[in-house]
Amino acid sequence: MRWLSIILMSVLVLTGLAFGLVYFVSEQKLSDRDAVLSFDLPIPEDEASIERGRHIARTRGCFGCHGQELAGKNFDEQWDWPKRAVAPNLAKYARNHDAATMEAAIRQGIGADGRELVSMPSYNFSSLRDDDLAALLGFLRAAPLVEEPLPSPALGWEARWGFVKGDELSMADWAAMVPPLRIDPAKDPELAEGEYLAMTMCNECHGLDLRGDTYGSTMGFGPPIPDLAIVATYDRTQFEALIESGVFPDGRRLGIMTLVAPDRFPSLSDLEIDRLHGFLQSLASTPAPEAFWRP
Ligand code: HEC
Ligand code: HEC
């Protein structure tokens, strides 16, 4: 009897220690990058900048994840990998945080508490231009405040174990790996604009460099996501139809893009679609470089 209770106690203690270690190491991995708090552009308040900010928020998907009224959203039913992801109320957040803190969350993937974000795709925004970011912040500050109750976020053991093993990377880790924009706007303004649009809208899913992503699929998150060089096979009309609906001409629906495209991309102007189409078509002339997100 005595031996049995000693064994039982030891198992309990060891299990407790193992969980403690996973907790400690995962917290460490989520705080090994420091935010650079240097963004100091004034937050604009004029009508034109606020409209520009609304356009950025719409086309970059802030509404889809933070709610159509920016009141925040609980992702319990959509994704369960982190256990409970909760996108905060952005209108409220923007009133309570300064520009540098918001910049760190949006472009660097580091939250106001200094901890790296886990579900917010900051790597898709890390190439946002300073003036567009300032306009976005102006829009968020001016947006009407709608408050709804939100649960607290939670990071589960499975997700923590993923961070410990290194299979999971934080949003700050991903944001730090986004390749810089290559095209010089002084030399080719149209192509550069297309690259900017693609690198702040499409690399959320199509790979950090737009040349495809199979990393998620190897971890069981849906199908491999194609290299956008495939756009060379789309004429302008077909391209617009696909990105605005997420549905192929034959009626076949695109995985997750069918969910997000109608929320984000119908707001793109004709000129923006021209630039995006032109730039993506140019990708076909270079082979996709090797990258770990295409193992
Ligand atoms: C795919 C969904 C998604 C999209 C798109 C998205 N967010 Fe988030 N965001 C989240 C989630 C989930 C969180 C909660 C924190 C986390 O991910 O760890 C969050 C957190 C934040 C935070 C708070 C960070 C902190 O201090 O804790 C800010 C600010 C923010 N998002 C701004 C934006 C803006 C601005 C946009 C559009 C440019 C945007 N988000 C687009 C899902 C999203
Ligand atoms: C939220 C994720 C997501 C975003 C953001 C996204 N895509 Fe997609 N896209 C996908 C997925 C997933 C597929 C493939 C799904 C399938 O074939 O069922 C896809 C497929 C495509 C295809 C079809 C390729 C083919 O097989 O012919 C094109 C073209 C495309 N996307 C263009 C874009 C462009 C341009 C952008 C940015 C403006 C974009 N996508 C943004 C997820 C996304």
Image (cartoon, grey):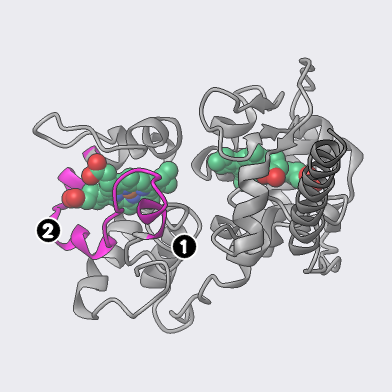
Q: Which residue is mark 1?
A: 199
Element assignment for label 2: helix
Quick one: label 2, few (<14), some, or many (20+) residues within 10 Å?
few
Q: Which residue is mark 2?
A: 233
Q: Amino acid at mark 2?
A: Thr
Q: What residue is rendered at 79% in x and 68% in y? A: 32
Which sits in the foreground, 117 or 178?
Answer: 117
What range is drawn magenta here?
215-241
Answer with the quarter of the image where residue 278 lies.
bottom left
* In the displayed structure image, the side of residue 248 where residue 50 appears, left or right: right
Quadrant that contains the C terminus: bottom left
Asked if residue 171 is positioned above or below residue 75 in the image, the reply reads below
* In the displayed structure image, the side of residue 196 where residue 25 appears, left or right: right
Say if disc 2 is inside 8 Å of ligand 2.
yes
Q: Amino acid at mark 1?
A: Met
Answer with the quarter of the image where residue 2 lies.
top right
